[in-house]
Amino acid sequence: EPEVTQTPSHQVTQMGQEVILRCVPISNHLYFYWYRQILGQKVEFLVSFYNNEISEKSEIFDDQFSVERPDGSNFTLKIRSTKLEDSAMYFCASSGLLSGANVLTFGAGSRLTVL
Amino acid sequence: ILNVEQSPQSLHVQEGDSTNFTCSFPSSNFYALHWYRWETAKSPEALFVMTLNGDEKKKGRISATLNTNEGYSYLYIKGSQPEDSATYLCALYSGNTPLVFGKGTRLSVIA
């Protein structure tokens, strides 16, 4: 069964460093998402991406964050200068359709720890 | 801001017990409700997408109901097994907005 893969599974970084989290969505999906979950809190939406551009982003997704689909298969989330509060599990997801009736297929997550 | 609430936050049951938990959501602008199962170190896995008031869906020993008038969905697990131990997430889709997730119910099934 097709799956969404994420790397790295865990990254530890120093505050102020740049981090890139990578995702390979399902190949025939068109909509891509990043969510995150801070320990003990809700899964929060960060950004959605369609047709090579951001379609929606949350308040969390400020200028320190960016996304890219550089080569038609990878979908990356970059945090330019990490802060302690960026420590979270970051999930990539993809879907074939925009409809809310269409499920998201999630990756297993990348745990980011900022020291 | 849409608020999706799940209860209880965590639950411990004995193997063989049946259990259920709740997802509450604003009933206005409802499009769809998703249920996902998230096992530790794995991807959240879609269980159900429910769109119609009164919907009942079933997948093996797991079933879900939906009441969009009063804004809740129940997830039931019949005869819980240790492999059912996971966090169960519900998420609301209200049209033109991303999915809004609840905090999840963490289920532990004790053998």
Image (tube, rainbow, N blue to C red):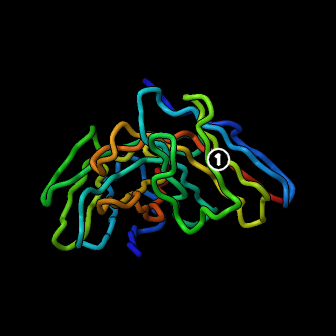
Residue at 46% x, 61% y: name it. Answer: B104
Residue A66, placed above or below residue A22: below
Residue at position x 19%, y 66% in the image: B68
Q: How many marks?
A: 1
At x 49%, y 47%, the residue is: A49
Residue B105 position by quadrant? bottom left
Q: Nearer the viewer, residue B103 or A91?
A: A91
For the residue pair B79 and B10, the one nearer the viewer reads as B10
Whether residue B25 is situated above or below residue A67 in the rendered picture: below
Looking at the image, residue B21 sits to the left or right of residue A13; the answer is: left
The residue where tag 1 is placed is: A77
Measuring 17% from the left and 51% from the top, which residue is drawn there? B56
Q: Is residue B34 left or right of residue B15?
A: left
Crowding near pointer 1: few (<14 within 10 Å), some, many (20+)? many
Q: Chain of mark 1?
A: A
On the picture, is B15 further left or further right than A63?
Answer: left
User: Residue A94: where, in percent of width, then height?
Assistant: 45, 40
Residue B106, can we see it?
yes
- Which residue is most to the top? A1
**Looking at the rendering, in which quadrant would you find the N terminus of chain B?**
bottom left
- Mark 1 lies on a secondary structure that is strand
Question: Taking B43 as reference, is A12 above or below it?
Answer: below
In which image quadrant can residue B81 be found? top left
Q: Quadrant of residue B23?
A: bottom left
Q: Amino acid at mark 1?
A: Leu
| Residue B78 appears anywhere in the view | no
Instruction: Locate residue B28, reporting x and y percent.
Output: 23, 73
